[in-house]
Amino acid sequence: VAVPTKLRVERWAFSFQELLEDPVGRAHFMDFLGTEFSAENLSFWEACEELRHGGQAQVRATVDAIYQQFLAPGAARWVNIDSRTMERTLEGLRQPHRYVLDEAQLHIYMLMKKDSYPRFLKSAAYRDLLAEAVVPPEAKRRVFPFMRKPLHASPSPALLPASPSGEPVAATSGPECGDRGT
């Protein structure tokens, strides 16, 4: 997995959705879940996302594959959803459509958000990511526009050379503001 920037790693702590939307963050979260023996939760969530956004022709086959892998009794990567959600999901599987697993997906999402995500943020893995994250060199920027130095500005009268009387000597090139060229 690529080494992310420090800002990127810090963004994962803003919200669980930020973490899931970042492919690098999601990969690190998957690795963490693997150490907790709960990577099937994120895999199930990802499979449901693929179902929702995939082609209509594959919906029935995809729903069946997700059921066999995650929800069927004795499934290899069984996810733990409550009995009420399981009942509704099984009822929906009789007439599969791309949103049939939404309730089960939401249940797993909330489980990860409330349980696994806070542990990930407190884990040594996340702290190590923060420590190893790349800090890109900052470009020198002025905070306020008035602090910028104009490229072609006339100097301040205070910076003009003074005449013997102490008055600033005006620039002689070009017409004066009040001069109309007469």
Image (cartoon, rainbow, N blue to C red):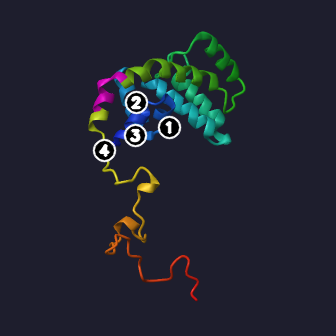
**Marks 3 and 4, Cα distance to the nearest angstrom?**
10 Å
**Marks 4 and 2, Cα distance to the nearest angstrom?**
21 Å
In primary-sequence order, the first of circles 1 and 2 is 1
Residue 168: percent from left, percent from top = 38, 71
- Amino acid type at circle 4 is Val
Residue 124: percent from left, percent from top = 29, 25
**Marks 4 and 1, Cα distance to the nearest angstrom?**
21 Å
Q: How many marks?
A: 4
Mark 3 and mark 2 residues within 8 Å of each other at the beta carbon: no
The residue identified by callout 1 is 21
Task: Read off the magenta span.
Answer: 122-128
- Amino acid type at circle 2 is Phe
Residue sitting at the far bottom? 182
Question: Circle 1 — which element?
Answer: helix
Could you tell me what secondary structure mostly forms the magenta stretch?
Answer: helix
Residue 104 seen anywhere in this rendered image of the structure? yes
The residue identified by callout 2 is 29
Image point 67% across, 41% down: which residue?
57
Residue 165 in the figure: left or right of residue 71:
left
The residue identified by callout 4 is 135
In primary-sequence order, the first of circles 4 and 1 is 1
Mark 1 and mark 2 residues within 8 Å of each other at the beta carbon: no
Placement of 25 over or under 93, stated as above or below? below
Residue 74 magenta-drawn?
no
**Marks 3 and 1, Cα distance to the nearest angstrom?**
12 Å
**Marks 3 and 2, Cα distance to the nearest angstrom?**
14 Å
**Marks 1 and 2, Cα distance to the nearest angstrom?**
11 Å
In primary-sequence order, the first of circles 3 and 2 is 3
Q: Quadrant of the C terminus?
A: bottom right
Question: Circle 2 — which element?
Answer: helix
The residue identified by callout 3 is 8
Residue sitting at the far top? 83
